Amino acid sequence: MADGRTPGPRTELAAKIRTDVPHSARIWNYWLGGKDNYEVDRAAGTAFAEGYPDIVPIARQARQFLIRVVRFLAGEAGVRQFLDIGTGLPTMQNTHEVAQQVAPESRIVYVDNDPLVLAHARALLHNTTPEGVTTYVDADLHDPELIISDARNVLNFHQPIAVMFLSVLGHVADVEEMHSVVARMMAAVPSGSYLALSDSTKASMAHAEALAKYAETGAVPYRQRSLEQLRQCFESLEMVEPGLVPVNQWRPATAEVGTIKPVYNYGAVARKP
């Protein structure tokens, strides 16, 4: 640097951010109506939506799924620790905001390895209560052991933990590795912990074609899974009702029942016995 000073963490992160290639977290932010995206992301997001118009309501339903799941976990299930893997960009009603609203003492660890996400996390992800803890770790979801090691600095692995993989496992190319990542994470947490997971399925050809075109933009490809492949992530766990269902059919508000159009993003919550 011209002044001879050592670059700080924020400067180092900014240097790693690519603005010439569309990025999934920024595109997702665009679909949710956020402002933390670039022209290349908006172009890719618009092109994707033109080929698959359902993606915008699916993105918004996925966020509502997160809100309902965290409310259930912090409320009815009594969980006070959350490990949110593949956080994405902060938007409305993030995990710590929902959990700490229900249980002010909740401790949340966000996990991501994207420089833009980490930069925003440092700026925006703060406790909403004096009793709680909100922090993040810089780690890749392909490396559960590193995630677990860093999370131990904040979370008590002798008490139940909610492990969350929401719309992120499509970034794992190999299905067997996807299952291994989930299994290794759940092996590390104690009895009474929960797995919350959601992802896209292969039910829609239009979605598959849009994903193929998305990969051609230079962005990291995202893979659809079959329902059976998603269901296998919950082996040896006790599924919470209503099971593995479209995310907008997982415990919707009473007023919504009977009026919901199924989406091709499925999710579930399960307890480790």
Image (tube, rainbow, N blue to C red):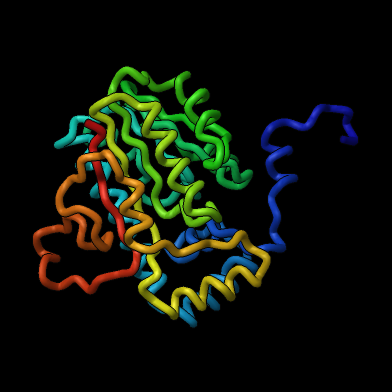
Q: Residue at x 35, y 67 (%)?
A: 58
Measured from the top left, where is residue 106 in percent x and y? 30, 28
Q: Is residue 258 above or below residue 34?
A: below
Q: Say left or right for 144 vs 234.
A: right
Quadrant assignment, res 206: bottom left
Q: Say left or right for 115 vs 256.
A: right
Measured from the top left, where is residue 266 in percent x and y? 31, 60
Q: Say left or right for 75 vs 187.
A: left
Q: Is residue 39 above or below residue 267?
A: below
Quadrant assignment, res 204: bottom left
Q: Residue at x 52, y 71 (%)?
A: 211
Q: Residue at x 55, y 29 (%)?
A: 146
Front one among 176 and 146:
176
Front one among 126 and 141:
141
Q: Quadrant of the C terminus?
A: top left
Measured from the top left, where is residue 33 in percent x and y? 44, 64
Measured from the top left, where is residue 245 in percent x and y? 24, 60
Q: Say left or right for 161 vs 109.
A: left
Q: Quadrant of the N terminus?
A: top right
Front one among 152 and 59:
152
